Amino acid sequence: GQNIDQPTEMTATEGAIVQINCTYQTSGFNGLFWYQQHAGEAPTFLSYNVLDGLEEKGRFSSFLSRSKGYSYLLLKELQMKDSASYLCASMDSNYQLIWGAGTKLIIKP
Amino acid sequence: ETGVTQTPRHLVMGMTNKKSLKCEQHLGHNAMYWYKQSAKKPLELMFVYNFKEQTENNSVPSRFSPECPNSSHLFLHLHTLQPEDSALYLCASSQDSGGYNEQFFGPGTRLTVL
């Protein structure tokens, strides 16, 4: 079956670094997406990885290992506004997104 | 503001009511999606439309009926719902439904079925 696993909740301190992990198992693979969703708001696109390695975009970076079925989202210099849920999604062979349940990130001062 | 709007933002309905959710995208996209988001569960894809044609129906009960009159508008008609249908219903759009395409989401309709 198809499955995406990510931690339910994480807590980090303002100014610190946090890594949110995601493991995936899908029928075929056409890339891995990360979305951010603030409470009561729309999910918004953060990153897309289809090749192995690290993609850096400002304070946020995303890593992919296709052989391990593993990705992580790295958030640096955490700010209070980074408190949100982070959704991992794998695109399968039919170009459908298979979603994880999301990781709620709590930032403390 | 993602370019995808949804109305209403909140809806409370009884099990015998009929209501409709509306989604509109201003991005010139050709694909539109309905998702169900329940607390602590993954997003569930319900329907996909590509160039106004339904391309996916993920075993959704017939009490949910989608309509896509054109590439910019998508409706979800609701009738005789159950309390377990209470959830956040998200609409999304993308350039088309094949290949790599970032999906843009609306803010959702929070549905409560009494």
Image (cartoon, coloured by chain):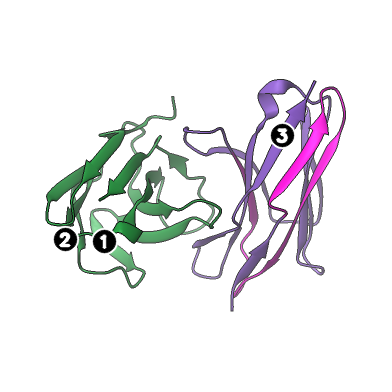
Chain colours: A purple, B green
Decide whether the magenta segment is chiefly helix, strand or loop.
Answer: strand
Please tell me whether mark 3 or mark 1 is closer to you in this view: 1
Question: Circle 3 marks a residue in which chain?
Answer: A
Question: Circle 2 marks a residue in which chain?
Answer: B
List the residue tagged with mark 3: A106
Residue B48 seen anywhere in this rendered image of the structure: no
Structural crowding at the residue carrying mark 2, measured as other residues with C-alpha within 10 Å and reported as few (<14), some (14–19) or many (≥20): some
The residue lying toward the viewer, choosing from A75 and A33, is: A75
List the residue tagged with mark 1: B82
List the residue tagged with mark 2: B80
The residue lying toward the viewer, choosing from B81 and B59, is: B81
**Residue A32 drawn in magenta:** yes
Q: In which quarter of the image is residue B56?
A: bottom left
Structural crowding at the residue carrying mark 1, measured as other residues with C-alpha within 10 Å and reported as few (<14), some (14–19) or many (≥20): some
The three-letter amino acid code for the residue at tag 2 is: Thr
Report how far apart the C-alphas of labels 3 and 1 lie in the structure. Answer: 33 Å
Report how far apart the C-alphas of labels 2 and 3 lie in the structure. Answer: 38 Å
Identified at 39% across, 53% down, the residue is B35
Element type at mark 1: loop
The residue lying toward the viewer, choosing from A36 and A95, is: A36
